Image: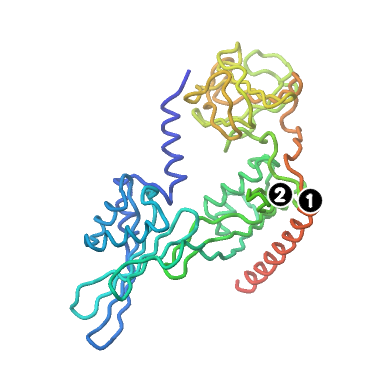
């Protein structure tokens, strides 16, 4: 059973979430765009009358080309062609995306007509391209796009009721909280491993532009959890090949072959081991973990692999089995429906949605029954300790350890500053 309604609604939500800076439906975002197309005004007195300088921000809407965007912003035809020509030197207008930001610096002296003197175009890769009008009235880009400056921010807190509430209280955004839960998802069951009294600290890198006051997507550079089970610190590190990964203090990659939990926001309703079966009425071995969650909650593949089985399977109801490697496989049961395009033999990646929570088969309520198979036998998913997929050694490890020392020093300095400031 393929469930298009859950799939399509989820994809819409993902598109809007992923693209909170890149995409918004025009009809839903008119108010937001009105705010985005705001201006800051500066007036100075000069010979010939007061000079009024205005900085106007505007974002590209869905379906707009660069020319249509400039027309909507009331840019004169002659200026439009000059701006497009200047941008073409370093950027293809065909790559313009919804949500791209432009800042127009407009100047007017006395009663003269307002003219554009400068344009700052914020690119998707945390770079900016600056276009200026010269003394001949022509637009030009004097240099290729440059990276935005970056600043570090320190956040910390203590868990009272739950991690999310404590993180919001500390000043972390929902996007950063999602980053943190994602990078720890290989090491701990984030929904259950963190309890009252546990503490956390986070170092965040934020790209920004002083001239326009633009702030980009923040990234977690370092995250430290102090749990009852012990501390767990992860560092964002760029490798020689340009790839970016998170590593613990020993240089072991945070990424594992399998995630601890294949579903977000669920609670464990039944653990691995002997139990009194709620439907069959007698004690039997429960060879998996049950996660209780609302009907339609997305279920993700806990690792890369091939869909070996898919379909109705006795008391399991709608069932999926993924073979990850020679030794490990995972099973998902009682699904309400499968994600569109999922089929037997298809390769899936870790984190891909494979279906949605249901109560098909022998079930008293909506939940996911999750199993890990090791060499053909079900094992307890909550105690399986998957090895790290990447270990640094030799000179790369030495470089990484030197990097972590610097990050710790910066975190300590910012922590001291925040405590002093408070």
Q: Residue furthest top?
A: 314
Q: Residues within 10 Å of mark 2 (few under 14, many from 20)?
A: many
Q: Position of residue 293 (x, y in %)?
A: 55, 31
Looking at the image, which is closer to me, 422 or 416?
416
Q: Position of residue 201 (x, y in %)?
A: 66, 58
> In the drawing, does residue 193 fall left or right of residue 357?
right
What number is the disc on residue 398?
Answer: none
Quarter the C terminus occupies: bottom right
Residue at coordinates 56% horizontally, 32% vertically from top-left?
A: 352
Q: Position of residue 377 (x, y in %)?
A: 75, 19
- Residue 114 against residue 404 in the figure, above or below: below
Residue at numbered disc 2: 247
Q: Residues within 10 Å of mark 1 (few under 14, many from 20)?
A: some
Colouring: rainbow
Q: For the residues labelled 2 and 1, say whether their Cβ atoms are less than 8 Å apart.
A: yes
- Residue 13 against residue 228 in the figure, above or below: above
Using the numbered discs, state the Cα–Cα distance from disc 2 to disc 1 in whole angstroms: 8 Å
Q: Is residue 193 visible?
A: yes
What number is the disc on residue 250?
Answer: 1
Looking at the image, which is closer to me, 283 or 147?
147
Q: Secondary structure at mark 2?
A: strand
């Amino acid at each position: 059973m393929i469930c298009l309604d859950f799939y399509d609604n989820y994809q819409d939500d993902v598109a809007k979430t992923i693209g909170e800076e890149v995409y918004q439906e025009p009809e839903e975002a008119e108010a937001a765009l009105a705010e985005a197309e705001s201006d800051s005004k500066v007036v100075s007195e000069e010979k010939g009358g007061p000079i009024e300088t205005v900085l106007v921000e505007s974002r590209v809407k869905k379906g707009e080309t660069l020319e249509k965007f400039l027309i909507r912003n009331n840019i004169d035809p002659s200026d439009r062609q000059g701006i497009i020509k200047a941008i073409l030197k370093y950027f293809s207008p065909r790559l313009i995306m919804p949500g791209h930001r432009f800042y127009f610096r407009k100047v007017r002296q006395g009663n003269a007509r307002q003219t554009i003197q400068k344009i700052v175009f914020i690119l998707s890769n945390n770079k900016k391209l600056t276009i200026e009008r010269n003394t001949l009235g022509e637009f030009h880009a004097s240099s290729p796009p440059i990276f935005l400056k970056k600043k570090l921010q320190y956040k910390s807190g203590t868990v009272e009721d739950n991690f999310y509430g404590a993180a919001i209280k500390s000043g972390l955004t929902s996007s950063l909280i999602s980053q943190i839960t994602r990078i720890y998802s290989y090491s701990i069951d984030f929904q259950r491993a963190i309890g009252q009294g546990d503490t956390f600290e986070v170092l965040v890198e934020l790209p920004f532009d002083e001239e326009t006051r633009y702030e980009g997507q923040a990234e977690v550079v370092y995250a430290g959890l102090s749990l009852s089970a012990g501390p767990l610190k992860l560092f964002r590190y760029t490798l020689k090949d340009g790839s970016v990964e998170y590593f613990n203090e020993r240089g072991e990659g945070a990424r594992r072959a399998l995630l601890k939990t294949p579903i977000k926001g669920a609670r464990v309703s039944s653990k691995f081991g002997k139990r009194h079966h709620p439907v069959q009425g007698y004690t039997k071995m429960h060879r998996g973990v049950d996660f209780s969650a609302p009907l339609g909650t997305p279920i993700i593949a806990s690792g890369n692999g091939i869909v070996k089985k898919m379909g109705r399977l006795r008391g399991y109801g709608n069932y999926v089995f993924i073979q990850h490697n020679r030794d490990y496989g995972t099973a998902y049961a009682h699904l309400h429906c499968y994600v569109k395009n999922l089929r037997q033999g298809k390769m899936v990646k870790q984190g891909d949605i494979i279906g949605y929570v249901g109560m098909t088969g022998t079930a008293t309520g909506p939940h996911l029954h999750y199993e890990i198979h090791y060499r053909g036998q079900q094992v307890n998913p909550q105690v399986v300790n998957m090895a790290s997929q990447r270990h640094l050694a030799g000179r790369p490890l030495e470089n990484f350890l030197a990097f972590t020392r610097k990050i710790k020093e910066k975190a300590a300095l910012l922590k001291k500053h925040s405590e002093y400031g408070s």
